[in-house]
């Protein structure tokens, strides 16, 4: 295929230009009219509305201004240049006819981006409003952002509205300081149906019938159970929960029930985060044994942070050495049920937190090796060897091995000296199952 033929294909041309910065694309503006359109298609694909107003003042050629507007796919609104509430943002799509997203950036710590997306379903425009809802565990704490009145109106006859809810339970606790006082109602944690309570809190946001829950961030074991009860409750509207994104920062065993119940629709799964770990956190054998590895169908982003094993108090072990290696599930698994599934991960990050001790015994390292081989066999079917995933968090590899530091943040911890051997074991087993060599810097 000739260079001219490749350049004439829009998807290949856009992909090529996407790897260039605007400074490198600008010279194309002066080649000819065709190259001018190719260049602005890339330069103006994401445009700040303030910048557009500036262009309106400096560019008198209406044909050129229309070309700029046609190139916009994402329009960015800042608080200072956004006079319309989200309920009226559909008017921006009348000006930027090819745009698919209108986003208002929020820079305060207590705020989130507001997004209205446009698509077409069966020839009819569909507008989706990304709506962030923060739920506490008492009525007093049920303070949400933004207000329900900001949703686009459902009354319009020429298009459909669907609200996309992003739920955060116990997220950023400084936002939801407990205000529980005598006489104030709080949910009964032993109630038969906590899901009913949860549904009541969500009712103002779901009563239109055109709402789906796409993302949930769970902050505790109780929150996991509340959400499970909500999913199973007969009063929960049909098709309300269509999760594509789950984050579980404070992980507990019942997180697997949440994941398993929604495994066929998940696109993003984040389990665990770097913090001063406790004995309540999940360990690698639990992740391997209980995660529904072979059931994911749409998973594209996976981030797992967990303990390798648990460090116990000296008086809690029979031998008094104060350390136990939990080897449950470390035996080799049957690979017959590990066929290729899903589209292949696009992003992957695995962080294993080892005990604080600087050394591991030969027996512990042998068990570690078995466990990392098992982990590789679990991960392999989620990877397309032709398009391996990229690491998350600006790192250069998928796997990270660190020690549980007590005096500084885990994010700054160097890998222990025994990590290199475990990296090699994980990489070799992954390559064996995939039947293909992978670049070492990604593993």
Image (spheres, rainbow, N blue to C red):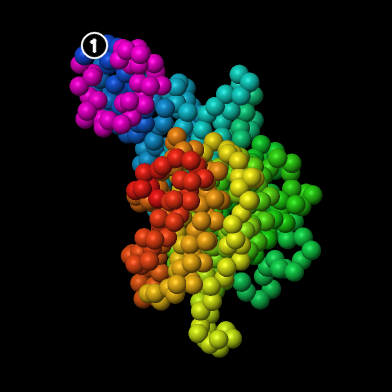
Rendered view: 412 above or below 262: below
Residue at 55% in and 56% down: 374
Residue 236: x and y in percent read 74, 48
Residue at 55% in and 86% down:
319
**Magenta-span inclusion, residue 4:** yes
- Residue 382 lies left or right of residue 83; in this view the side is right
Identify the residue position indicated by label 1 in the image. 32
Q: Quadrant of residue 62?
A: top left
Vertical arrangement, residue 222 with respect to residue 356, above or below: above
Q: Main secondary structure of the magenta part?
A: helix
Q: Judge from the rendering whether residue 328 lies leftward or rightward of residue 97; answer left or right.
A: right
The magenta region covers 1-30
The residue sitting at 40% across, 50% down in the picture is: 443
Q: Residue at x 55, y 66 (%)?
A: 283
Is 290 placed above or below 342 here? Answer: below
**Neighbour tally class for label 1: few under 14, some 14-19, many 20 plus, Cα within 10 Å:** few
Viewer-side residue, 429 vs 118: 429
Where residue 379 appears, as percent x and y from the top left, is 53, 49
Relative depth, front residue between 7 and 308: 308
The quarter of the image holding the N terminus is top left
Count of numbered marks? 1
Q: Position of residue 390 (x, y in %)?
A: 41, 43
Q: Is residue 353 magenta?
A: no
Residue 307 shows up from this direction: no
Helix, strand or loop status at disc 1:
loop
Q: Position of residue 50 (x, y in %)?
A: 32, 34
Question: Which of these two is toward me, 311 or 263?
Answer: 311
Residue 190 falls in image quadrant: bottom right
Against 427, residue 326 (above or below) is: below
Residue 266 in sight from this viewpoint: yes
């Amino acid at each position: 295929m000739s260079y001219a033929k490749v350049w004439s294909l829009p998807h290949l041309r856009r992909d090529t230009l996407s790897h260039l910065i605007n400074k490198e694309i600008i010279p194309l503006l002066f080649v000819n009219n065709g190259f001018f359109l190719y260049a602005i298609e890339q330069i103006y694909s994401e445009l700040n509305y303030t910048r557009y107003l500036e262009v309106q003042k400096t560019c008198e050629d209406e044909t050129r201004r229309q070309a700029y507007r046609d190139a916009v796919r994402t329009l960015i609104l800042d608080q200072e240049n956004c006079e319309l509430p989200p309920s009226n943002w559909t008017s921006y799509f009348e000006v930027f006819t090819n745009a698919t997203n209108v986003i208002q950036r929020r820079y305060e710590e207590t705020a989130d981006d507001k997004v209205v997306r446009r698509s077409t379903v069966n020839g009819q425009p569909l507008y989706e409003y990304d709506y962030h809802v923060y739920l506490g565990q008492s009525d007093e704490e049920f303070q949400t952002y933004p207000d329900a009145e900001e949703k686009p109106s459902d009354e319009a006859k020429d298009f459909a509205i669907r609200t996309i809810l992003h739920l955060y339970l116990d997220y950023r606790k400084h936002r939801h300081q407990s205000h529980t006082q005598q006489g104030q109602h709080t949910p009964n944690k032993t109630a038969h149906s906590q899901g009913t309570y949860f549904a009541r809190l969500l009712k103002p946001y779901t009563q239109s019938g055109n709402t789906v829950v796409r993302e949930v961030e769970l902050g505790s074991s109780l929150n996991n159970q509340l959400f499970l009860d909500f999913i199973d409750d007969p009063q929960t509207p049909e098709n309300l929960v269509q999760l594509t994104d789950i984050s579980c920062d404070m992980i507990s065993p019942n997180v697997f029930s949440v994941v398993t119940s929604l495994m066929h629709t998940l696109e993003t799964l984040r389990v665990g985060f770097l913090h001063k770990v406790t004995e309540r956190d999940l360990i690698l054998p639990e992740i391997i044994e209980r995660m529904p590895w072979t059931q994911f169908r749409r998973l594209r982003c996976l981030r797992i942070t967990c303990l390798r094993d648990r460090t116990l108090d000296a008086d809690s072990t029979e031998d008094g050495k104060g350390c136990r290696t939990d080897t449950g599930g470390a035996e080799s698994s049957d690979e017959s049920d590990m066929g290729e599934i899903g589209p292949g991960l696009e992003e992957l990050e695995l962080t294993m937190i080892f005990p604080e001790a600087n050394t591991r015994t030969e027996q512990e390292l042998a068990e570690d090796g078995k466990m990392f081989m098992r982990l590789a066999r679990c991960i392999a079917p989620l990877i397309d060897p032709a398009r391996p995933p990229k690491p998350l968090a600006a790192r250069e590899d998928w796997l990270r091995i660190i020690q549980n530091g007590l005096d500084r943040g885990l994010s700054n911890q160097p890998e222990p000296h025994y990590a290199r051997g475990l990296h090699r074991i994980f990489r070799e087993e992954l390559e064996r199952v995939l039947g293909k060599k992978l670049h070492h810097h990604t593993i």
